[in-house]
Image: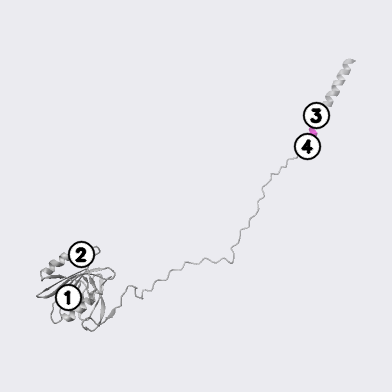
Amino acid sequence: MKKTLFTTAACILLSASILGACSNNETANEAKPAVSSTATMPVIEATATPEPSAAAPAATEAQEPASPDDSGPLASERPKTQAFGEQEGGVSGQEGTLEQGDGYSLYVFKDFTLDAQSGRLSLTDDPAYYAQIEHLPSGYDLTALKQQGQTELSAIGKVSDHSGELFEHPLGFAELYLQATGDKGIEDYMVWKNQAGEAFLFRIHNSKGELSNQFSPWVMVSLATLEKN
């Protein structure tokens, strides 16, 4: 009888334990939130592409620069002719014509001829009256040129030195001005610079004949207009 009661009590306790466990599982399942099967997608805002503004200026094509007018004279050009006034001794003025030499230009008067190849400016009626023109390079040796000039002129006669300021003379100033007088006339050996600092060497021969007065004033005026091209 006791054995039967013990067995019955054990069964009751086992049943109670099973019921308690089931009750706890149901409670846990109710407390647990349901998991959504749908993944959360990030929200992407749609960005509208701005349309081109109607007020925006249209792209302009690059304009080609206007080509310079080749018909006009250059600023450095000198007039083709130029009038020169009365010279010392009452010599009437006249008009000179611009001519080109070897790398330089100068005004030449009606009684003169310029040989551009040889650099000789002479009287047309008598080429024995002439000025030989030589353009000097920068850095020329003035001392050496003076020695050369003295050697050349000493064969003609006594050499005199008139270098420096030249009063009432078209050239105005000469770095070197040597002169000698002989049977055939007067020889000048000169180194002269224009206002631009361009240096020239002149060998001038004046035969001292009938055409001397025609040659002497105007050859110096011509030389004073020398400019390098």
Instruction: Identify the image quadrant of the C terminus.
Output: bottom left
Work out whether residue 138 or residue 142 is closer to the camera in this orientation and state it: 142
The magenta-colored residue range is 23-32
Which secondary structure type mostly characterizes the magenta part of the structure? helix
Q: Is residue 44 left or right of residue 212?
A: right
Q: CA distance from mark 3 to mark 1?
A: 143 Å
Identified by mark 2, the residue type is Leu
Q: Residues within 10 Å of mark 2 (few under 14, many from 20)?
A: few
Identified by mark 4, the residue type is Ala
Q: Earlier in the sequence, mark 3 or mark 1?
A: 3
Identified by mark 3, the residue type is Ala
Q: Which residue is mark 2?
A: 142
The circle drawn on residue 130 is 1
Q: Earlier in the sequence, mark 1 or mark 4?
A: 4
3 vs 2, front mark: 2
Q: Which residue is mark 4?
A: 31
